[in-house]
Image (spheres, coloured by chain):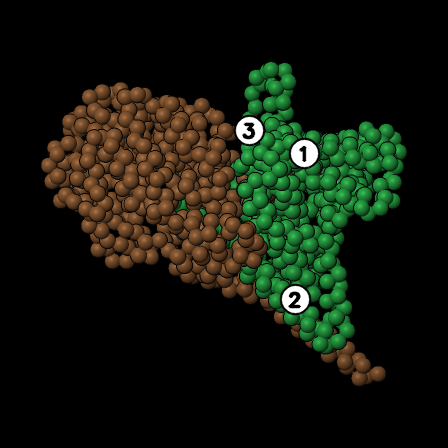
Amino acid sequence: MVFSSLIFLYLFLPICLILYFLAKKIRVKNVILLVLSLLFYAWGEPVWVILLIFSGFVDYFNGRIIEANRGTKYAKMALVSSIVINLGLLGVFKYSAFFIQSINGLFSAHLPYAEFALPIGISFYTFQTLSYTIDVYRGNTKAQMKFSNFLLYVSLFPQLIAGPIVRYTDVAEQIDNRTTTLAGFKSGAIRFLTGLAKKVLIANYAGSVCEQLLSSNLPELTTAGAWFGIFMFAVQIYFDFSGYSDMAIGLGKIFGFQYPENFNYPYICTSITDFWRRWHISLSTFFRDYVYIPLGGNRRHLVFNLLVVWSLTGLWHGASWNFILWGLYYFVFLFFEKVVLKGRMEQMPWYVKRPYSLLVVLIGWAFFYFTDLGQLGTFFQSFFFASPNGLIDTTSQTLIINNSLFAVIAVIACLPLSKYAKKLVNYMGQKSNAGMAVQFSLNFVYMVGVLFFCTASLVGQSYNPFLYFRF
Amino acid sequence: MRDLQLEKEARRRRRGLFTGILCLTFIIPLLFLGVVSLVDGQAQVSEDENRELSQWPSFSLETLFSGEYFQQLDAYYTDQFPFRNMFLSVNKFLNNLYYVPTGDDMTIIKGNQEGIGGEEESSAPSSSQVSSGSDPSSSQQAPSSSQEASSSEPDNNTPVDIQGNVDAEVKENYTIILKDRIMELYTVSPTYLPIHAQLVNSIKEQLPECRVFSLTAPTAVEFYSPNQYHTGNKSQLRTLEILKENLSDDVIQVNAYGKLRNHTDEYIYFRSDHHWTQLGAYYAYTAFCESAGFQAHDLSEYQTGRYDNFLGTLYKAAKNYPQSDKVRDNPDYLDYYVPLSSHSGEIYGDANFTVQYQIPAVKTGLDNPSYAYDCFCGDSALIKFTSDCGTGKKLLMTKDSFGNAFIPFLMDHYSEVYVVDPRHVSKVFGDSFHITDFVREHQIDDVLVMNYAFAAQEKNYLSKLESII
């Protein structure tokens, strides 16, 4: 199931909220959340929900072994088994086909392989359970004694499908010990609705424009089309992913959980280093804490560490060469900024560092978008002013003009204006009664408006006309 | 001091009240629509979309474990959501908010979802939120992080030998709204056009004693669109060239294109529908007469009539876009021409040739038809028209819906016309129907393979055609 669907919004969520808030004891609430989360997951993966439960059980078990045998070799064995099993599952389900295909390609072999449909969220939950066992081993947290609690942590539906990657240490306390205040519920609801608007009203729209330019009609791509198309993709992926994170955080808040932020207005970054402090924060901190620093961080063989982390980051995003290239692409620029420039990029004037950053990120998205390297080549040909179809044509011109207002709105939405708007509104609310009324009205209109228009858009997406009647 | 405290207390309470109301603002609409969605009735069909709306899916362990059952539930819930039409108009309003018109008043929109072959297409993924196995299951193709496992390759149990060069073709049909005309954009398929020609050639090889005609009709985009959309690999003239290169010399090619090209300032194509008007079909008919050695009747000889306020398939596909309002406010009308000869048609309902319906080639005097183009014979597996024109000649034609407007003119030249729509044959005849056998059995003189430019190169249509040769 996905958040941006009518069945989630109008059936699953209301039922979940009613059951959750009718229950008085935290234990009952947790059971409700657990059952509903598993149902939520099983909706999309009726078979591989087993894998989720299995992965949860393995690390629950390992966690307890580590806890009970601290300092002995059994603890280490448990840690290793956790790593092996988690990465093994990920490797088999996500990477085995890719890996064998690559070998076949390199050595002209014909090794057989099974193509698995990727179980939803496996990249997220294996990393989450892995972070748990490592943190228990390091002594950062005590092991969770109840399996149902641990499984709740793993499967909690707000963050299960698309992150953020929530570490056990972030929520350990909150599992048995949390409340939802009215204010918390309200702010969670608003956060959720904001994410929904980002996804439905911006990301989906950008996606359909981008698809017209870069997907269906790629052979006819012009230079203008390439630039506008990849720009639309940059919009789509940011609002889609950050919108999803907003919905996750908002829902978590409604149920009393505080999740870490995952995005921080990445497109106002001043360098690539800065970009990665703002984009998918939970992933980059995961790699920092569990790979980069253990390898030695910036103290021992920095370049090698960076190379490993960024290859893995690329690979995590998808089992395909373009994603690895994407990771390596960022490695090059991070190397450039950290080692060559030694951090001096931040001191450059804004008209150097911002365009540089945006351009690098924009080109990076091309590596992300095209899984077929041939198509990637076609795209770059157009992007770098060498398109066989010229600079611009009727289609790209029409699409650019038709969507110019949307482009402006999207760019504005990338700026942290909403942060200041919120501060202003809240300040107003504190100041006077009139201010409070205004704050209330704005919030009210916002909530109703977002829900109404997103619903309309979701219904609109199901409009599926055929020229010939289908019986 | 106390006043200040009281005031603070009052403010706190007011804030709490406001917060509480906002919380209710979230939950009440969700509850309300949720409840309504459970108790309201179900709609069967969406006339605008030309499809049935999803019904409650049937349960089976198989569909449960494949995930299909939940997907169908999703689709069902979305299709049957309350106030669907109201939300669709709000969605249309949203489309308008973002939209900036170009100087030449053109909009590019996504076209229809399926090819011409219809039917056996793999169950249309009603753009519902299908989790394609990629990590963050997102409804569109937005892969939040991981790759998308989406494979939108249509089904492929076609016997046609397809050199899977699918990349060479543009996959998606786009449609443009240019002022008050809606047109489907076209791309030449160098892969499938030769296959089409081969099929026609094989008909001629198996029926050497018959005359075999090939007629491919262009569409509006060829004549009324900006240059880019009817030149190069988008030119339907190019399509005809490729067909010509591949058709054998024994096949008689009808140059309908040339006739239509000379009459583009007349009302030969609808603006809200993908078909030609019967006037357009008439000009193609004059070309056919030239090829067949007939004397075409003059337009003035026919009795005519009109169905007003005709908004066709393309309008329905574009209805969600406010730019289509120009078309709505200036609708088409359908002028029909009635055959001179007395005639009637029989539609067969099963492989025993049981007559299911009797119809004329043109239904006149329909009262407010929901789709005026249906006044022609419609699409059926096999229709036999008998006319009293007295020539004694017989024709069998395979056609898509463009042929429907063309058939009336044939009534005055053939005593019997057998009309076959390849897309519907298997439903009625299974795989027992073959036009070559049928032609020999019934001593039919002429065979006409007639299509419009899209169907002429569409994989599913061609495979259906192949299976009935």
Residue A192 location (% of width, % of height): 64, 56
Colour applied to chain A = green
User: Which numbered mark, 1 or 2, is in the foreground of this view?
Assistant: 1
| Nearest to N terminus: mark 3 or mark 1 | 3
The image quarter in which residue B60 lies: top left
The image quarter in which residue A187 lies: bottom right
Residue drawn at the location 16% of the way across and 45% of the way down: B340
Residue annotated with mark 3 = A115
Residue annotated with mark 1 = A384
Which disc is residue A244 wearing?
A: none
Residue drawn at the location 60% of the way across and 23% of the way down: A101
Amino acid at pointer 3: Glu
Residue B436 location (% of width, % of height): 23, 25
Q: Chain of mark 1?
A: A
Amino acid at pointer 2: Asn
- In the image, the chain rendered in brown is B
Circles 3 and 1 in contact, beta carbons < 8 Å: no
| Nearest to N terminus: mark 1 or mark 2 | 1
Callouts 3 and 1 in the same chain: yes
Q: Residue furthest top?
A: A108
Amino acid at pointer 1: Phe
Residue B234 location (% of width, % of height): 46, 35
- Please state if A293 lies on the left or on the right of A329 as rendered: right
Circle 3 SS class:
loop
Which disc is residue A443 wearing?
A: 2
Residue B238 visible (yes or no)? yes
Alpha carbon distance from label 1 to label 2: 45 Å
Q: Chain of mark 2?
A: A
